[in-house]
């Protein structure tokens, strides 16, 4: 809406300026942009052409005023007199602006307007992304608030449940203690009561015997009473209570717990880490991210690192083509991601700290450039005996599956047809598009890449079936013919594996070959330095140099592959390994090992 308003305002300004001019009075001179004049009266030698807004003092003639009959503005009226000569400026000029040079400046003004339009578009996109971010933040705030409220209710419910359970257990304990002691005391009470009753009966019998006047049985009766008293229960009882009536050991004091509960607070959130961009490293398809905390925190349990591929520099957008990838359980203040494939121009990183219970805020996202050479195989160029699927190729003796090229016709010839293509831009310029071509045929079982190399250092790898009857990998020029085999013309360089009759590994160019004295690897790395004219082949696993071509590339190069009775797969999105770069610097001053092939 803002952009539309600005464009409309500019359009109306120019429209009013050109269409609202005064009626040209008789005897005036009209000057157009090319300064052709239509005259009825010749211009005066001293005629001055000037326009100034109403109310602005002074007379400031335009730069063309010294040239009679010329003016810088369109549709202007000749003033035959200066104000000082007694003439009057027509009223129509009082509302017109000061002279604007539109003759040669229209292109500059359009370019300036285009820049303004681009700036507005960029700003509108930023505002739109920020609006999306705010809306997403509002939605997240609502969801997060509901979640933490539910968590709080759940925690208090659980706390109440624990307290209720503890209360029931303690009450049960008190009841059991009371029952046990009651039983002990009641049993002791019953025994004592029976002993007392038996003792009272013996006492009554003894009193009766003492009061008796008979002497014959007294002795025996006294003896019997004495024996009964000796065996009476009263003398076998313990007169100490078996249980105490004191229950103070089951008293509780929750004053500390009450203070602790009253001191309950929300969990402390870990501080937000800060990624140290200057210490982060990107090399060998690995990325090392380093971060710090504002202050040490010994309660940090671990960190969570998230990364996402992107083709846009700057802060992450709401709508991205790739999702966040999560790495959890990081215990240190750095982490290295290994074995990455850089098929986009950038990667965005963010990290947050976690304690035992809660995670902190994410750090400010950091975007690092992940430049690497990425391409696809051009199935429209492949020999019909080659079945091409993505970056894999398989020999098909039955004639292969003819690729559906109608989809390819709808694609642009530019290598920038997809977001991944933006990762291919060299420091000087983007790779050049290869025009359409016919399929390879006859005995040229070849397929090319869809992207050319015209600058910089590039690297890719290819894994092949060592049982293939024949296999070749290298680069070719656009002029490579559809019947040409790799290495047999001046338009291609390659390493060729031959398993037919006798196994051999050779470097080929311009129909010349050199046998290589090295083990046959399972995968080969290809290195190109376009400016230096260097094409090197490496054992992809050990990074041992197999062969180097040194020449001067006059045209862009295309990765090229050949296979017969076998298969291979290509790995792209790789940076030049540091080992390869180091070896190339050491060998930069040495002579070519294959001068006879160049």
Image (cartoon, rainbow, N blue to C red):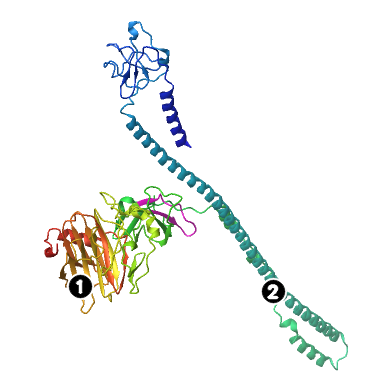
Task: Measuring from the top left, give residue 521's x and y in whole percent.
Answer: 24, 72
Q: Does residue 238 appear left or right of residue 65 in this picture?
A: right
Label number found at residue 505: 1
The answer to whether residue 543 is seen in the rendering is: no
Q: Which residues are magenta?
A: 347-367
Task: Measuring from the top left, give residue 22's x and y in whole percent.
Answer: 42, 17
Looking at the image, tell me whether mark 1 or mark 2 is earlier in sequence order: 2
**Which residue is at the far bottom?**
216
User: Residue at point 60% right, 58% down?
Assistant: 154
Which residue has dot 2 on it?
A: 180
User: Residue at point 71% right, 72% down?
Assistant: 179
User: Residue at point 47% right, 33% down?
Assistant: 5
Mark 1 vs mark 2: in front: 1
- Label 1 crowd (10 A; few <14 / some 14-19 / many >=20): many
Residue nearest the viewer, comparing 528 with 471: 471
52 up-or-down from 364: above or below: above
Picture mark count: 2
User: Residue at point 35% right, 9% down?
Assistant: 83
The answer to whether residue 1 is seen in the rendering is: yes
Instruction: Determine whether the residue tagged by mark 2 lies in a helix, strand or loop.
Output: helix
Assign the C terminus to one quadrant of the image: bottom left
């Amino acid at each position: 809406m803002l952009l539309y308003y600005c464009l409309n305002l500019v359009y109306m300004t120019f429209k009013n300026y050109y269409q609202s001019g005064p009626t040209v009075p008789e005897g005036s001179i009209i000057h157009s942009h090319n300064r052709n004049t239509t005259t009825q009266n010749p211009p005066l030698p001293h005629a001055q052409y000037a326009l100034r807004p109403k109310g602005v003092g002074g007379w400031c003639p335009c730069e063309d005023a010294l040239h009679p009959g010329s003016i810088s503005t369109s549709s202007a009226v000749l003033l035959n007199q200066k104000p000082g000569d007694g003439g009057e400026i027509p009223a129509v000029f009082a509302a017109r602006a000061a002279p604007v040079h539109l003759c040669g400046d229209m292109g500059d003004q359009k370019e300036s307007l285009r820049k303004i339009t681009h700036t507005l578009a960029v700003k509108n996109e930023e505002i739109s992304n920020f609006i999306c971010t705010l809306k997403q933040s509002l939605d997240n705030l609502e969801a997060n608030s509901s979640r933490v409220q539910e968590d709080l209710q759940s925690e208090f419910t659980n706390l109440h449940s624990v307290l209720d359970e503890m209360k029931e257990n303690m009450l049960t304990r008190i009841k059991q203690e009371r029952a046990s002691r009651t039983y002990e005391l009641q049993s002791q009470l019953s025994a004592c009561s029976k002993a007392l009753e038996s003792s009272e009966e013996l006492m009554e019998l003894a009193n009766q015997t003492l009061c008796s006047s008979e002497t014959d049985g007294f002795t025996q009766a006294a003896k019997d009473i004495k024996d009964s008293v000796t065996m009476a229960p009263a003398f076998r009882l313990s007169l100490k209570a078996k249980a105490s009536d004191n229950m103070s050991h089951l008293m509780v004091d929750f004053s500390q717990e009450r203070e602790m509960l009253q001191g309950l607070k929300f969990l402390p959130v870990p501080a937000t880490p800060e990624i140290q961009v200057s210490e982060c490293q990107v090399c060998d398809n690995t990325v090392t991210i380093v971060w710090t905390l504002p202050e040490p925190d010994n309660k940090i349990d671990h960190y969570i690192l998230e990364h996402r591929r992107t083709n846009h520099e700057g802060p992450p957008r709401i709508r991205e083509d790739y999702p966040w990838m999560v790495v959890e359980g990081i215990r240190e203040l750095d982490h290295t991601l290994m074995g990455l494939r850089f098929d986009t121009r950038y990667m965005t990183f963010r990290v947050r700290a976690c304690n035992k219970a809660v995670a902190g805020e994410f750090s400010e996202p950091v975007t690092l450039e992940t430049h690497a050479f990425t391409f696809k195989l051009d199935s429209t160029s492949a020999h019909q005996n080659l079945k091409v699927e993505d970056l894999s190729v398989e020999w098909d003796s039955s004639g292969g599956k003819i690729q559906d090229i109608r989809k390819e016709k709808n694609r642009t010839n530019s290598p920038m047809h997809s977001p991944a293509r933006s990762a291919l831009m060299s420091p000087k310029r983007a790779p050049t598009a290869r025009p359409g071509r016919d399929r390879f045929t006859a005995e040229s079982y070849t397929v090319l890449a869809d992207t050319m190399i015209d600058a910089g250092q590039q690297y890719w790898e290819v894994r092949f079936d060592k049982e293939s009857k024949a296999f070749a990998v290298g680069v070719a020029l656009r002029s490579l013919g559809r019947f040409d085999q790799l290495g047999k013309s001046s338009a291609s360089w390659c390493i060729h594996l031959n398993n037919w009759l006798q196994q051999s590994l050779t470097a080929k160019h311009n129909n010349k070959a050199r046998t290589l004295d090295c083990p046959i690897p399972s995968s080969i790395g290809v290195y190109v330095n376009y400016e230096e004219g260097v094409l090197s082949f490496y054992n992809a696993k050990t990074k041992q140099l197999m062969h180097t071509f040194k020449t001067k590339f006059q045209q862009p190069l295309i990765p090229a592959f050949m296979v017969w009775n076998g298969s291979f797969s290509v790995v792209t999105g790789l940076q030049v390994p540091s080992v390869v770069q180091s070896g190339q610097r050491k060998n930069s001053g040495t002579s070519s090992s294959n001068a006879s092939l160049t």
